[in-house]
Image (cartoon, rainbow, N blue to C red):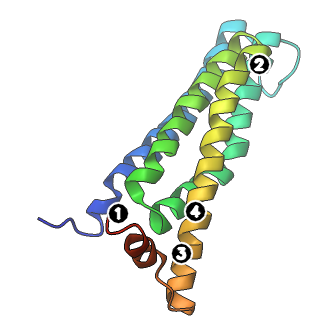
Amino acid sequence: MALSKMDDYIIPAAVTSLASYQYAYFAMQVGQVRRKLKFPPPKTTGEPEFERAHRAQQNAVEFAPIFFPIYWVSCFFFHPVLASIPGCLYVIGRHMYFKGYCEAPGKRLSGFKLISFSLRALLFMGAAGIATAALRRYADINLYKYVAEYSGGYL
């Protein structure tokens, strides 16, 4: 049974929903720290525990306009399931980053490395997918067909 085009994007939609929930969770965590420390808004400096949580959450917000577009470009032009692997790794890395940064700034680095790897993988997938689609559309060159023929039909 063939999946409809909409069904092809169930996993990317789930990853996007999970990432969006995660952003809301981070914001709630910052609010909890603020209440715990009785640190009134709009102050954002003066309490190291709050500053770490706030900065970790702000870093996540700053990366959102990078992650979401390249994730979906990779899903559309490369492959929705394969692009979801680094998409999930990004969400895991973002959690590691937030948790580590809240404990101590130096503990954020392993999460940042996973985030960075995930974004590079998504950028590569998106660029490869766009290039392949452009060659097929504008130069009538089908790289998938060429690679399949060159590999002796192993792909």
Mark 3 and mark 1 lie on one chain; the one further toward the N terminus is 3
Please identify the quadrant where the N terminus is shown. Answer: bottom left
Q: Residue furthest right?
A: 46
> At 48% from the left edge and 37% from the top edge, which residue is drawn?
21
Q: Which residue is under mark 3? A: 132
Q: Does residue 141 appear to the left or right of 115 in the view shown? A: left
- Are circles 3 and 4 on residues that touch, CB within 8 Å? no
Question: Between marks 3 and 4, how big is the CA–CA gap?
Answer: 10 Å
Q: Amino acid at mark 3?
A: Thr
Residue placed most toward the observer, 117 or 76:
117
Q: Nearer the viewer, mark 1 or mark 2?
A: 1
Give the crowd class for mark 3: few <14, some 14-19, many >=20 residues within 10 Å.
Answer: some
Q: Nearer the viewer, mark 2 or mark 3?
A: 3
Q: Which residue is under mark 2? A: 52
Measured along the vertical axis of the image, is residue 133 above or below residue 105? below
- Are circles 2 and 3 on residues that touch, CB within 8 Å? no
